[in-house]
Image (cartoon, rainbow, N blue to C red):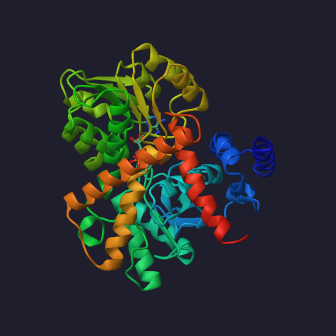
């Protein structure tokens, strides 16, 4: 019965979302894994919960026209998908990257529902973005684009309605320009965006939170496998916000980060990545990762980002983008003796990669749990904004640490409760689904 309800919901999903490959991948993973939950708690599938959960509340698509530095008119497409607000105001980042399509935003918004639920904080799920790529654009171009983007988006968001944040291509600079335009249009200074710079309303630790949280989560997974961070060779893909601060925290707890990447290639540094040099190159100078090898003796640069999984390591943290680790990548990790994989990015491992890791008994931490530290700290930023206060670095960091530990506990307990001990994918999906489904049932059919 439960199996057939899931199959019916998935059949409808495929029919209604032709070509939305990533959204289907994400929805199939969640619905496919919660069958044991529906067997044990059939009341949670009442009132069309499954069908309603996979249909966004609202999808907005809009034109974003702006002038580049030569005076030429450029046109991009903007998106905001408000997926589900049963637990609180919509919350989820904005992604600016040339690959962004409605499919991308729907998959990310869907994942966000369960991730936000796992934090136990009052947040619904949403995501947005544009096919605008900030790479190679001047500050003026980025500002004009952000102003035009917000000129449409502002009517759909608000501190109690929908609170966007950053994601790929959207950092403190973009959040600043977006906020400036929102404030001008709405004439209010509220916490309508998170990821703001700490000197004008942002929270300390927000920038570091996803990467730090990932390392706290992975520490629990390591402990369950009888390991600890100290001395472990670690490979981290990406070199953006999540990857950089995962590397920072991993290094500070004694790991040696031996490789990092960007979309063009990866660097291997047998002495351990020099975080401060990497941060200057990627965050301050917005340069390519190749520059690291030129400035650090003993480091090597290799073309092709996917080669990073051939670097021998004990821990692998994919922190770049979706589907970046395929079956071959997972097999390379297994062959070199990797003992743990935890996702910093959203859905970076393909289903085939996850299957290989599972078959080889490698503990796997799904992104919706392991990378939830960013959104959790965004909620802490909202709390500080609405109370007009500012917590210290240590205060926010210790709350983040507590949240990540509770997320891990929930995943572990749910996996056990629903009959698959150690399966953190089931654990994360089940714990998130139960919380959202109960709220939806209580709020009636809409
Ligand atoms: P950034 O834009 O800061 O960084 C993305 C990084 O990934 C860049 O180094 C980029 O390289 C690299 N990259 C992109 N595509 C590839 C690829 N195919 N192979 C290797 N590297 C690649 O983004 P974030 O760090 O914010 O986000 C990374 C991931 O984490 C995304 O999946 C995002 O959704 C997820 N996430 C982010 C959160 C946050 O708080 N920021 C919270 C939770 C999840 P290049 O510079 O060449 O483009």
* Furthest residue in direction top, as rendered: 335
x, y percentage for residue 94? 49, 58
Where on the picture, by quarter, is residue 156?
bottom right
The reply, left or right, for residue 53 in relation to residue 129 is: right
| Quarter of the image with the N terminus in it | top right
Is any atom of residue 62 visible in this view? no
- In the figure, 62 relative to 357: above or below? below
- In the figure, 10 relative to 294: above or below? below
Along the line of sight, which residue is nearer the eye, 202 or 65?
202
The reply, left or right, for residue 120 in relation to residue 426 is: left
| Quarter of the image with the C terminus in it | bottom right
- In the figure, 118 relative to 239: above or below? below
Number of numbered discs present? 0
Residue in the picture at 35% in, 65% down: 380
x, y percentage for residue 191? 39, 74
Along the line of sight, which residue is nearer the eye, 397 or 167?
397
Is any atom of residue 434 visible in this view? yes
x, y percentage for residue 267? 32, 27
Q: Quadrant of ligand 1?
A: top left
x, y percentage for residue 80? 58, 63
Residue in the picture at 22% in, 27% down: 272
């Amino acid at each position: 019965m439960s199996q057939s309800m899931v199959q019916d919901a998935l059949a409808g999903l495929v029919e209604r979302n032709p070509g939305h490959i990533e959204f289907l991948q994400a929805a199939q993973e969640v619905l496919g894994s919660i069958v044991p939950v529906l067997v044990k708690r059939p009341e949670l599938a009442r009132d069309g919960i499954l069908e309603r959960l996979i249909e966004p509340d609202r999808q907005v698509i809009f034109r974003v026209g702006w002038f580049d530095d030569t005076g030429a008119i450029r046109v991009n497409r903007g998106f905001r998908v408000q997926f589900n607000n049963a637990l609180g105001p919509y919350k989820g980042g904005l992604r600016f990257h040339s690959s962004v399509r409605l499919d991308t935003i729907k998959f990310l918004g869907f994942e966000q529902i369960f991730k936000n639920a796992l934090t136990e904080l009052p947040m619904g799920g949403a995501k947005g973005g544009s096919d605008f790529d900030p790479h190679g654009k001047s500050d003026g171009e980025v500002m004009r684009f952000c102003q035009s983007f917000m000129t449409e988006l502002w009517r759909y968001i608000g501190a109690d309605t929908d609170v966007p944040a950053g994601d790929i291509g959207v950092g403190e600079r973009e959040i600043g320009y977006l906020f400036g335009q929102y404030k001008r249009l709405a004439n209010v200074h509220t916490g309508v965006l998170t990821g703001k710079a700490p000197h004008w309303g942002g929270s300390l630790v927000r920038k570091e939170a996803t990467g730090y949280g990932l390392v706290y989560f992975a520490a629990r997974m390591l402990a369950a496998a009888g390991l600890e961070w100290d001395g472990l060779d670690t490979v981290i893909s990406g070199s953006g916000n999540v990857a950089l601060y995962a590397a920072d925290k991993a290094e500070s707890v004694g790991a040696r980060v031996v490789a990092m990447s960007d979309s063009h290639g990866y660097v291997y540094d047998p002495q351990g990545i020099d975080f401060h040099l990497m941060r200057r190159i990627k965050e301050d100078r917005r340069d390519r990762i190749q520059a690291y090898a030129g400035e650090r003796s003993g480091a090597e640069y290799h073309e092709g980002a996917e080669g990073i999984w051939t670097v021998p390591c004990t821990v692998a943290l994919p922190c770049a983008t979706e589907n970046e680790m395929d079956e071959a990548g997972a097999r390379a990790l297994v062959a070199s003796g990797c003992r743990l994989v935890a996702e910093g990015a959203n859905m970076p491992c393909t289903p085939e990669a996850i299957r290989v890791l599972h078959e080889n008994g490698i503990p796997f931490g799904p992104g919706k749990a392991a990378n939830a530290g960013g959104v959790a700290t965004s909620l802490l930023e909202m709390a500080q904004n609405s109370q007009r206060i500012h917590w210290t670095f240590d205060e926010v960091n210790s709350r983040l640490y507590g949240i990540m530990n509770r997320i891990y506990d929930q995943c572990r307990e749910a996996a056990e409760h629903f009959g698959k001990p150690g399966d953190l994918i089931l654990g994360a999906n089940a714990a998130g689904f139960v919380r959202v489904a109960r709220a939806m049932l209580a709020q009636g059919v809409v």
